[in-house]
């Protein structure tokens, strides 16, 4: 199996988990009196995740691909959100998923979100292996930049 095929398997797993996250059963009143507040908070967190995703997509420009194998003409982006985390798209997906968990309040979403994190971690390991081969400065960038979650100074 070549790298591109392996990458598409990771993408398929990621898409499956995202689909499950949004379609898994939801509880009617998961948090009792706090349900409406946490539901609104969940929607706000989802909106933040979408904003992170859109900003990340725009910053990557022509280098954007769902497959973790970098494009031949791709450039290494280390500015904007990419100066705060190495994988802001994955961070955005995790934030979006957390919003779903807050809104749904049900165990299937929590379990699926954990599997999504694991899937993205595995995908990032593969992607970073390839990025280190393609870009000589990637190892230094990775050493100073967190993978998924930004550090607050």
Image (cartoon, grey):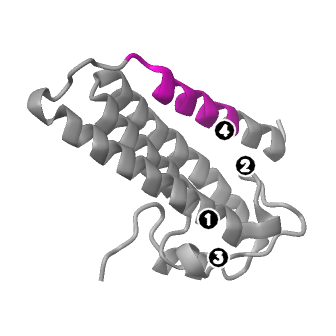
Disc ID at residue 10: 4
Measure how far apart labels 3 and 2 are at the Cα level: 19 Å
The vertical placement of 34 against 65, above or below, is above
Measure how far apart labels 1 and 3 are at the Cα level: 18 Å
Q: Earlier in the sequence, mark 1 or mark 4?
A: 4
Which quadrant holds the C terminus?
A: bottom left
Q: Position of residue 52 (x, y in %)?
A: 52, 61
Report the number of discs: 4
- Label 2 sits on a secondary structure element that is loop
Measure how far apart labels 2 and 4 are at the Cα level: 9 Å
- Direction right: furthest residue: 73
User: Which contiguous range is marked in magenta?
Assistant: 11-25
Question: For mark 1, what is the residue?
Answer: 56
The vertical placement of 3 against 146, above or below, is above
Labels 2, 4: front one: 2
Q: Earlier in the sequence, mark 1 or mark 2?
A: 1
Disc ID at residue 66: 2
Going by the image, does 111 lie left or right of 6?
Answer: left
């Amino acid at each position: 199996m070549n790298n591109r095929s392996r990458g598409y398997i990771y993408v398929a797993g990621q898409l499956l988990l995202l689909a499950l996250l949004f379609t898994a059963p939801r509880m009617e009143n998961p948090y009792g009196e706090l349900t409406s507040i946490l539901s609104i908070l969940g929607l706000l967190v989802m909106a933040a995740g979408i904003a992170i995703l859109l900003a990340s997509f725009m910053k990557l420009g022509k280098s954007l691909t769902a497959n973790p194998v970098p494009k031949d003409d791709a450039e290494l982006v280390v500015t904007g959100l990419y100066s705060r985390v190495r994988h802001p798209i994955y961070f955005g997906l995790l934030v979006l998923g957390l919003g779903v968990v807050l809104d749904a309040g049900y165990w299937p979403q929590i379990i699926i979100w954990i599997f999504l994190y694991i899937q993205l971690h595995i995908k990032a390991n593969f992607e970073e292996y390839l990025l280190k081969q393609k870009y000589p400065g990637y190892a230094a960038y990775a050493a100073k930049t967190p993978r998924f979650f930004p550090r607050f100074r």
